């Protein structure tokens, strides 16, 4: 009775938050429900488990969780099944709980399949209550050091979460990106007995700066089960070749960049590990459209923006590496320091903003707009990247910052996570 009351109040709070236009209600309902009934996630696991399925996925890691999750969901939906998914990237415990509540009906059974992205530290909390079949780890890069510490700490948190999940399901499969040397040997820390490894390669014509930056391991301590090759990188899309066992096939990804090739590889590896056929995988990848804040195009205040979430050095550098090729680009950076962003924004100094220095030095009229609570930190970083002070506009208030952007340029909006949520309110 207590659990049903918690669900009812959470659903009511969702309606109220959306009615008052206070946001997407992607976390607060779950927080409320957990306060009333701390074991509510275990209840949902039991409700889902009435209908057993192999298509139950957790995706974690420092980069690429949301896009990998979206791609995998698109694959699963090709089989005309309803899939539980935290689509807007709310991946802490509260967010996971919220998406389960949204998919629960008092009158009907819950969907049996789920694709859920989970924050690296939250995995150890969710995995003890919600039984899954496959856990994928995308990569391990420096991210939110004030919350998790260095990379080894993050790796240990993920390993703890996976080992707890194995206790619930000894047959669980772990999907690992073995190009990341922190993950290549991670299986030695895990109690799982089933592993699926994947790798991504690229033609020599593709910019290799990403590989140089992150020092990807090619030692292949484990032989990859799946190999994906980025054979062509276009503005807004990529052409990929996938090799699995004796099969090889081409597909088009409606996302650009090497980092999105890795996201596609994560989704494809998970799908194959779950027994999904190749044609279904191809259709899912090729029909996927961009997710909330991931190369998403939005009309805001009568101007079109393309939005790229930035939250750590690795992801930010790769976004800027891709966008530097647009000679009509103009950037608006919106940086906050809420808990979900990470209080410490020193990561801005590790991101390669120098990728766009040439764009600004070649056009003195091009503006760089800095907004959010850490607008001044962002402006200082751009100054040290080589931009002229006259090109940098500091406007902490988002609404005014959006008005300052040009109408004749290609506007790129690069927010931190909570800033992305703020942007939704200014549409």
Image (spheres, helix red, strand yellow):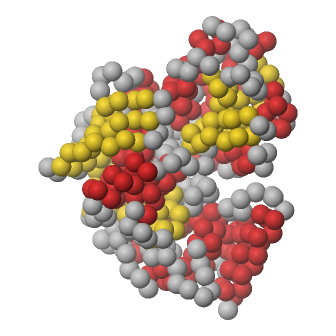
In this rendered view, identify the residue nearer to me: 327 or 347.
Answer: 327
Please, which residue is most extreme toward the left here?
246
Relative to 300, say whether 363 is above or below. Answer: above
Residue beneath the point at 61% across and 82% down? 105
What residue lies at 29% left-to-right and 36% top-to-bottom?
Answer: 229
Q: Compared with residue 425, is residue 205 higher up or lower down, i.e. above or below?
A: above
- Residue 296 at least partly seen: yes
Above/below status of 134 relative to 283: below
Residue 306, position in %: x, y? Answer: 63, 36
Residue 273, image x, y percentages: 29, 60
Q: Is residue 298 above or below residue 285?
A: above
Quarter holding residue 270: bottom left
Left or right of 204: which side holds 362? right
Q: Can residue 62 be seen in the rendering of this structure? A: no
Q: Nearer the viewer, residue 253 or 126?
A: 253
On the image, the x and y values in percent for residue 250 come to 28, 42
Q: Position of residue 59 (x, y in %)?
A: 46, 56
> How many callouts does the rendering have?
0
Image quarter of residue 284: bottom left
Image-quadrant location for residue 20: bottom right
Q: Nearer the viewer, residue 201 or 237?
A: 237
The residue drawn where x is 34% and y is 68% is 172
145 vs 192, left or right, is right
The N terminus lies in quadrant: bottom right
Q: Residue furthest bottom?
A: 1
Q: Is residue 64 left or right of residue 207?
A: right
- Identity of the residue drawn at 58% across and 74% down: 103
């Amino acid at each position: 009775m207590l659990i049903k009351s918690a669900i009812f109040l959470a659903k009511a709070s969702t309606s109220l938050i959306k009615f008052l236009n206070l946001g997407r209600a992607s976390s607060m309902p779950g927080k409320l429900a957990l306060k009333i009934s701390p074991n509510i996630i275990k209840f949902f696991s039991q409700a889902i488990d009435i209908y057993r399925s192999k298509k139950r996925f957790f995706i974690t890691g420092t980069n690429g969780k949301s896009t990998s999750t979206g791609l995998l969901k698109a694959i699963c939906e090709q089989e005309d099944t309803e899939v539980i998914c935290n689509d807007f990237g709310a991946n802490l415990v509260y967010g996971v709980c919220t998406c389960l509540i949204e998919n629960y009906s008092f009158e009907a059974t819950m969907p049996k399949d789920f694709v859920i992205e989970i924050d690296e530290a939250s995995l150890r909390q969710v995995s003890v209550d919600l039984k899954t079949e496959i856990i994928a780890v995308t990569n391990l890069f420096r991210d939110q050091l004030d919350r998790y510490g260095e990379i080894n700490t993050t790796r240990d948190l993920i390993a703890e979460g996976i080992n707890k999940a194995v206790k619930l399901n000894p047959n669980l499969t772990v999907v690992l990106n073995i190009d990341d040397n922190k993950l290549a040997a991670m299986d030695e820390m895990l109690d799982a007995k089933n592993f699926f490894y994947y790798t991504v390669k690229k033609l020599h014509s593709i910019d290799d700066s990403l590989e140089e930056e992150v020092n990807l391991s090619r030692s292949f301590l484990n032989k990859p089960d799946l190999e994906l090759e980025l054979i062509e990188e276009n503005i807004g899309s990529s052409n990929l070749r996938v090799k699995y066992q004796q099969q090889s096939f081409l597909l088009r990804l409606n996302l650009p960049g090497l980092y999105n090739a890795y996201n596609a590889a994560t989704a494809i590896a998970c799908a194959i590990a779950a027994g999904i056929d190749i044609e279904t995988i191809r259709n899912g990848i090729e029909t996927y459209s961009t997710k909330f804040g991931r190369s998403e195009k939005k009309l805001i205040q009568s101007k079109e923006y393309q939005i790229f979430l930035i939250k750590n050095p690795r992801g930010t550098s790769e976004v800027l590496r891709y966008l530097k090729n647009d000679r009509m680009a103009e950037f608006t950076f919106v940086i906050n320091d809420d808990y979900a962003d990470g209080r410490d924004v020193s990561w801005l100094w590790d991101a390669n903003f120098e990728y766009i220095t040439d764009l600004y030095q070649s056009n003195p009229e091009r503006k760089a707009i800095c907004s959010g609570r850490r607008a001044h930190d962002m402006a200082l970083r751009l100054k040290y990247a080589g931009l002229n002070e006259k090109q940098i506009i500091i406007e902490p208030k988002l609404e005014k910052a959006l008005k300052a952007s040009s109408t004749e340029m290609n506007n790129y909006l690069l927010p931190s996570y909570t800033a992305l949520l703020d942007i939704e309110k200014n549409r």
